[in-house]
Every structure is written in C-alpha cells, then in structure tokens.
Image: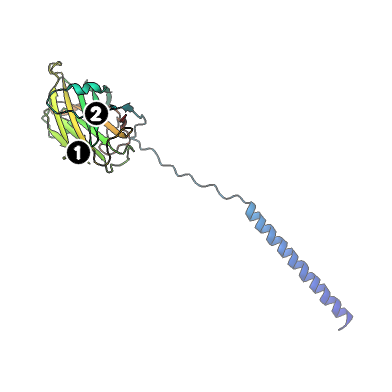
Amino acid sequence: MSHGLHNRIRRTIVLLAAVTVLLLMLGACTSADKNLTPEPAPTAVVTPTPPFRNPVETNLHALAEPVSPIFLGHRQNVWNLAKDNPITQTVSGDGGTDGWFRFLWEEDAVYVLVRVNDNTFDTGADDVYERDSVVIYINEDGRKNLRYAVGDAFYAVDRSGRGYVGRGGAEEGFVCSVYEDPEAKGNAYYAEFRIPLRSVTGRYDREIGFDVRINNAFEGECVHVVQWADTSGKTEITMTGVGTVRMD
C-alpha cells in the first residue's frame, strides 16, 4: 500500500470518529433538554355549585336520650324534653305563617313535632302542597346528596290529618297526626310524625340531613311557604340545602 493511500485512510477514520463523537454529543444534549423541559401542570376539574344550593349549613342538637312518644291526638309532656327550632325562612309568597319543630329519636325512627301558626283552615286542593300542610325531609346518611339516594325521602300531612308518603318514603312505620293547639283558639295547630329509618340506625353521635316545610293555603292555593333550612324550593329534587340534626 502506498504512503498516500495510507494517509487518506487514516484521515477518513479520524473524520468518521469525529463525526460519531459529535453525533453522540448532540444526542446527549437533546436528551438532557427533554429532561429539563417542565411537564404541563395538571388541569383542575371544577364542579360548579348547583345554583339552587343553599350555602347555609344549619346545625342543631337533638335530644341526648331516645324517647318514643305515643300518638294520642294531643301534645304529650315528653315533647318538653326537646327544644324549639324556629321555621321562619320564606321560600315563596307572603302569608304570615311560621312555626317551630322539636325532634326525638329511637333506634329505628325519628319523631318530629311541628307547631304551625296559621289562622285560616284550608285543605280543599287536590295537591298536598296547595293545602295547609307540613312536609318533613330526611337524608339518613347526612351527605346531603345532589340527587335522591337510598335513605332520602319526604313525608307530608295536611291540616285535616291526611298523610302523604313522598319520594323515597315508606308507608311501613310511618305515622302522622294533626291536632289543633287548644290555647291558640284556631290560630295554630300541631303536626306530629314518626319517620322510619330505613338505611341507618338511630344512635348517639349520628348526624342526618333534615328539614321541615310549612305550606299555608288560602282559597285552594298555597300563598306562603316557610322552611327551616333550604329556601331553594327544590328539596323534593335535591338534599343539598337541608339542615343537620345531630343525635347527642
């Protein structure tokens, strides 16, 4: 092999080696650049609050001892162990009605006594919501579900004593009674409920979602609605605005 050819081969080998080293360096830089590039931040998923949600959380303490009243058609002394909880928040209309409720409980049911101030007796409409009536809402797991689930229900009774089992309710174990307040001379009445617990057991420290609504009717239509916690008017659809009862 001639000396000139040998030199050319050597220069080619050196050139190829230099190119290889350069390519390796470029590859390393590219990889490093990728590692240094920050990954995009995760996108936050925001669930909007329903427009009908009542942001006010109402909490109260129920009786610390389970008591089972007997429905006798008049107010019993056992109700004196519970405290008044005012029902004054207007949902619709303006009819001058309001009231309060008291709450007792036992292992398989809750008991509610509602006193209603109403000086006009009107129960002629077909719809219980268009009569003088009281509605109880119960959310047994206390989660205030967006949509009715197991343990969510409502019950009603009109001023004449006709009971109504609403969405999610059960006839078995449901008892209601209505009687006039003898001291009010026709201007007030009591509605008394036994609401069965279907998915939980009443016990100390349990919290449940709860609400009470009063409908005041006049000449066959509802003119005023007040409620304890939720003022959305949509408690038959969602439990998000109801209050909380704690069994202490």
Can you identify the residue that label 1 sits on? 166
Residue 161 is at least partly visible in this image: yes
Dot 1 falls on a residue whose secondary structure is loop
| 131 or 75, nearer to the observer | 75
Identify which residue is drawn at 19% across, 41% down: 170
Can you identify the residue that label 2 sits on? 104
Q: Amino acid at mark 2?
A: Leu
Percent of width and height locating residue 6:
85, 79
Answer with left or right where residue 48 lies relative to residue 131: right
Q: Residue furthest right?
A: 3
Q: Residues within 10 Å of mark 2 (few under 14, many from 20)?
A: many
Identify which residue is drawn at 16% across, 36% down: 164
Q: Residue furthest bottom?
A: 1
Lower position in the chain sequence, tag 2 or tag 1: 2
Q: Above or below — where is 35 with respect to 154?
A: below
Q: Amino acid at mark 1?
A: Gly
Identify which residue is drawn at 67% across, 58% down: 30
| 59 or 223, nearer to the observer | 59
Identify which residue is drawn at 25% across, 37% down: 236
Percent of width and height locating residue 53:
34, 34
Q: CA distance from mark 2 to mark 1?
A: 21 Å
